[in-house]
Every structure is written in C-alpha cells, then in structure tokens.
Image (cartoon, rainbow, N blue to C red):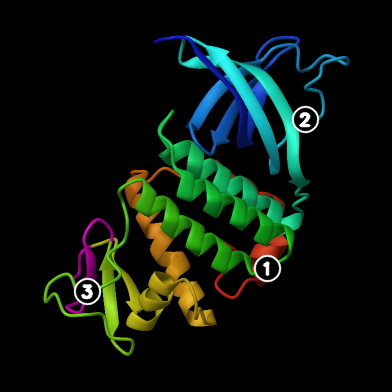
Amino acid sequence: MSMTRIKGEPGFILHRRPYSESSLLVDIFSRHHGRLTAIAKGARGLKSAFRGMIRPFALTTLGWSGKGEVKTLTQCEWAGPDFELKGPGLYCGFYINELLLKFIQRYDPHERLFDQYLKSIIGLNQGESTQGILRVFEKALLNETGYGLQLERDHESGEALQPEQQYQYRPGMGAFVRISNETGGVMVRGSSLIALRNEQGFDETALRELKHLHRAVFQYLLDGKTLASRMVFSRIYSAEVSRAPDGALV
C-alpha cells in the first residue's frame, strides 16, 4: 500500500480505545474516504494537542498518514457544532455508530451516508423523534451497502405495494401478500413500507412495524448476533424500555 497523506477531511469519531499508555486507537468515519482506523499518538497525555478532541458526535477536521491498514492521526480539530447527545438520544448515536462499524468496509467512501449520518446526529441533538431518525438512517445504510429493502413491489406478483394491504416481509427477499410459515417474516402494512420509501408520513403503527422489520433484517444480516449497543441500552435504560409501547426503544 502506497504512502497516504490526508488533511482537512471532515469526519466523525465512531469509537476510541486505549492503544498504549499514551495513545488511542481511533475508528473514523470520513466523508470522502469512508471508515478507517488510526493511531492517535500521545493522545492520552495531558499536553497532547488531541486531548479533549477525540470524542464521538463532534464534526471534526481530520488528517492522517501512513502506508498500512492502520494510519497515524495527524490532525483532529473541531469543525462545527459539538453535539451533546443525552439519554436515549445518546444511545441512538452509539447504535448508529455500531452499525457503521459492522457494515461499512474500510476505505469505501459513502458520501451520501455520511451526510445522512450528520443529519441524524443533528436531529438527535435537537430532540426529534428517535424512531423516525433511526429508520431513515437504517434504510440509507442498507441501500449504501447493497442490502436495500424492496419498497416498490410485491416480490411474487410484481404489483405495486398497496397502502391498505398487509404484507409479510421476508429478509433477503421482499414483501409477499401470500403468508408463509417460514421463520423470520415480519408482518407490515403497505402504508408503512411506502412511508419508509418516501421517508415521511410515519404514524405510530408504521414506526412500530418498521422497527421490527429492520430488527429482523439486521438479525438476518448479522447471522443472529446481537449488537452490543442494544444490550448495553437494555440494561441502563430498563425503565424507559419497560414504558415503551412495545417494550423497546429501537
């Protein structure tokens, strides 16, 4: 791999962890270069220029260099508002960060997804409906990674989805009018699928159905593995989960 030198790149910190006594290993989502991992040398030191800068949900200007898969962070400066997510909004932010880490390949640019991520973080920071924000982001992620849902037609007949029709959506296939006993199918109204396609018009039932649909899709793609952020949230916010209409917030 040839030497890479990048600077002035807009991006977000998805995750960080100790790398040595003085450094951090940082997962980055950048607008033009996609996801990458970099070492922030000396970032844990009291006098480091990076101290206090390497944090999630802050739009930053980043730079890095190096030949290998893991780069060396050379620049990390705040570039815009520092979004201070709290409560369930904070969890939702960690959840979408984990989705990016699970599904986005390193050095695969996703500019539209980056813009949708920024829009999602802004919405969470402003207290907008977490359910609508998550469903639209999940849709964008699935589309960008080649797993987009079929939101136009019945899988068998090819006919356009009808708002009043009840469908069984089978992950990896699509929506069916004919109900099957196959496991993994999720019942969902045509109007809910159309709302997701249009990214507007979500009523309470649509948000509930689409949450279960996306959960089934991600479980299918993750081969049954559970996302860590969901497990953590269920422990920390157990009271909120118990009060939610269907027992979960995401």
Label 2 crowding class (10 Å Cα cut-off): few <14, some 14-19, many 20+? some
Query: Residue lying furthest front in this view?
Result: 8
Query: Looking at numbered disc 2 in the image, what kind of residue is underneath it?
Result: Met
Is 148 displayed left or right of 65 in the figure? left
Q: In which quarter of the image is residue 49?
A: top right
Q: What element carries label 3?
A: loop
Q: Nearer the viewer, residue 149 or 209?
A: 149
Q: Which amino acid does label 3 sit on?
A: Arg
Q: Residue at x 65, y 28 (%)?
A: 62
Secondary element at tag 1? loop
Distance Cα–Cα, label 1 vs label 2: 26 Å
134 up-or-down from 101: above or below: below
How far apart are the two marked residues, 2 and 3, measured between alpha carbons?
47 Å
The residue where tag 1 is placed is 128
- Disc on the earlier residue, 3 or 1: 1
Residue 20, percent across and down?
A: 69, 10
Q: In which quarter of the image is residue 1?
A: top left
Q: Which residue is painted at 20% across and 76% down in the image?
A: 179
The kind of secondary structure the magenta stretch mainly shows is: loop
Of the numbered discs 1 and 2, the one sitting upstream in the chain is 2
**How busy is the neighbourhood of tag 3: few (under 14 within 10 Å), some, or many (20 plus)?**
some
Q: Where is mark 3, residue-wise? A: 153
Locate residue 247, reporting x and y percent. Answer: 57, 68
The residues tagged by marks 3 and 1 sit, at their Cα atoms, a distance apart of 30 Å
Residues in magenta, as a range: 171-182
Which residue corresponds to mark 2? Answer: 53
**Above/below status of 193 relative to 212:** below
**Element marked by disc 2:** loop
Which residue is found at the position 41% from the left and 42% from the top? 225
